[in-house]
C-alpha cells in the first residue's frame, strides 16, 4: 500500500457534522475516481460519514466497484441516526450490525481494516472481542483502534491483533506522541487524522500557522502540502489520509508525497509539536 491515502469524511461536506455545506455526490465521485487515477490505493471511511446529500460509503461503493484491490479502512463505534444526530456509541451488541452496515453500503464481502473508534475511557476488551470474532468469521480482514491512549493500545493488543492506530496529530494539534512511537516499535501503522486541518479540526479550512507557512514559503508549496509531508516524515510506519472533497486540493495532496522536508524544516515544525520526526 502507498503511504498516502484519502480520507473520505470531507467528501460529504465542507464541515462534516457541523454547519458546513453538503457536497454534491457527482463531485465526491469525481474526487475518488481522480484519486484512484493518481495512484491512491487506500481510503478511510465510516458509515457515519454522511450529509444530507452524500454518503461517503456509497460514493466509495460506486467508485471502487471496478477497483476491488483498493484497501478500505472503516470505523465502528460512533453512531448517528438518519437525521444525522449523534446517538449512543455502539456497545458490544451493536458492533456486528455496524460491520454489516459497512459491508452493505460498500458492497463488499469483507472489510479490509476496521478501527474501533473509542470515545470513552472504558475497557476495550469486550468490544474488541466481538470484532476479533468477526475476523475469524471472515467479515473483517484486520483490526485497528482509534482515539486511544497508550494504555488502551496495550489493552487492545492483549485482546486482538491490532495492525493500525488512528489518532489525531498535526504540527499545531498535539497528540499522544507515546502512541506514535509505540506503533513504530511494534511495527504497526500509525494513521493521524486532522493533520491538514490542524487546530481547525472539523471546522476547516486549513488552520493558518506561521511556522508551517514559513516552511511552505521556503519550498514554494502550500501549507497543506507541508502538513502532509510532515506527516509522512514522522516515520515509515505512518500513513497520511488527508481529507478533501475538492479536486484541486486532492491533486496538491497527492503531489505532497514528493515534498522532502529538510532537517531544519522538521526542527522548526517540531518546536510547535515537540515531535522528533524520523
Ligand atoms: N478516527 C477519527 O476519529 C477521525 C476523525 C476525523 C477524521 N478522520 C479521518 O481522517 C481523515 C482526515 O481528517 P479530516 O478530513 O478531518 O482533516 P484533514 O485531512 O486534516 O483536513 C481536511 C481539511 O483540510 C482541507 N484541505 C485538504 N486538502 C487541502 C489542500 N490541499 N489545500 C487546502 N485545504 C485542504 C479540507 O477542505 P477541502 O475538502 O475543501 O479540501 C478540509 O477542510 C478524514 O477524512 C477521515 O477519514 C478520522
Image (cartoon, helix red, strand yellow):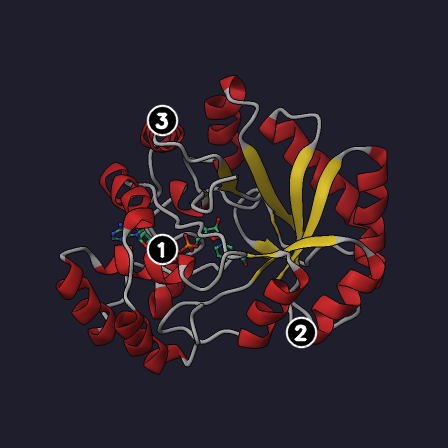
> Number of numbered discs present?
3
Pointer 1 residue Cβ closer than 8 Å to ligand 1: no
Q: What residue is pinned by disc 2?
A: 150
Sooner in the amino-acid sequence: mark 2 or mark 3? 3
For the residues labelled 1 and 2, the Cα–Cα distance comes to 33 Å
Residue at disc 1, secondary structure? loop
Closest to the observer, 12 or 84: 12
Residues packed near mark 3 inside 10 Å, few (<14), some (14 to 19) or many (20 plus):
few
Residue 200 can be seen in this image: yes
Q: Which picture quadrant has residue 165? A: bottom right
Q: Residue at x 78, y 42 (%)?
A: 96
Q: Residue at x 32, y 61 (%)?
A: 227
Q: Is residue 68 left or right of residue 272?
A: right
Pointer 3 residue Cβ closer than 8 Å to ligand 1: no
Q: Which picture quadrant has residue 33? A: top left
Please provide percent x and percent y for residue 76. 66, 49
Residue at disc 3, secondary structure? helix
Q: What residue is pinned by disc 1?
A: 19
Q: What residue is pinned by disc 3?
A: 37
Instruction: Report if the CB atoms under discs 1 and 3 are less than 8 Å apart.
Output: no
Please provide percent x and percent y for residue 112. 65, 37
Amino acid at each position: 500500500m502507498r503511504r498516502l491515502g484519502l480520507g473520505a469524511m470531507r467528501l460529504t461536506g465542507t464541515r462534516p457534522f457541523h454547519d458546513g455545506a453538503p457536497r454534491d455526490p457527482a463531485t465526491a465521485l469525481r474526487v475518488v475516481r481522480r484519486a484512484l487515477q493518481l495512484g491512491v490505493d487506500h481510503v478511510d471511511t465510516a458509515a457515519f460519514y454522511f450529509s444530507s446529500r452524500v454518503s461517503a460509503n456509497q460514493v466509495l461503493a460506486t467508485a471502487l466497484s471496478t477497483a476491488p484491490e483498493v484497501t478500505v479502512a472503516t470505523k465502528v463505534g460512533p453512531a448517528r441516526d438518519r437525521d444525522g444526530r449523534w446517538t449512543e456509541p455502539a456497545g458490544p451488541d451493536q458492533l456486528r450490525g455496524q460491520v454489516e452496515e459497512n459491508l452493505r453500503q460498500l458492497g463488499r464481502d469483507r472489510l479490509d481494516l476496521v478501527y474501533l473508534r473509542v470515545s470513552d475511557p472504558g475497557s476495550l476488551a469486550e468490544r474488541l472481542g466481538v470484532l476479533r470474532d468477526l475476523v475469524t468469521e471472515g467479515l473483517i480482514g484486520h483490526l485497528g483502534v482509534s482515539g486511544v491512549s497508550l494504555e488502551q493500545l496495550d489493552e487492545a493488543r492483549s485482546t486482538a491483533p491490532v495492525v493500525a492506530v488512528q489518532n489525531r496529530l498535526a504540527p499545531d494539534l498535539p497528540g499522544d506522541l507515546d502512541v506514535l512511537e509505540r506503533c513504530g516499535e511494534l511495527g504497526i501503522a500509525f494513521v493521524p487524522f486532522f493533520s491538514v486541518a490542524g487546530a481547525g479540526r472539523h471546522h476547516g479550512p486549513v488552520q493558518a500557522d506561521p511556522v508551517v507557512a514559513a516552511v511552505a514559503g521556503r519550498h514554494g508549496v502550500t501549507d497543506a502540502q507541508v502538513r502532509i509531508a510532515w506527516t509522512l516524515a514522522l516515520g515509515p510506519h505512518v500513513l497520511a489520509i488527508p481529507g478533501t472533497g475538492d479536486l484541486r486540493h486532492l491533486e496538491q495532496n497527492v503531489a505532497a508525497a514528493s515534498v522532502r522536508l529538510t532537517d531544519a524544516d522538521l526542527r522548526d515544525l517540531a518546536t510547535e509539536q515537540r515531535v522528533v520526526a524520523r
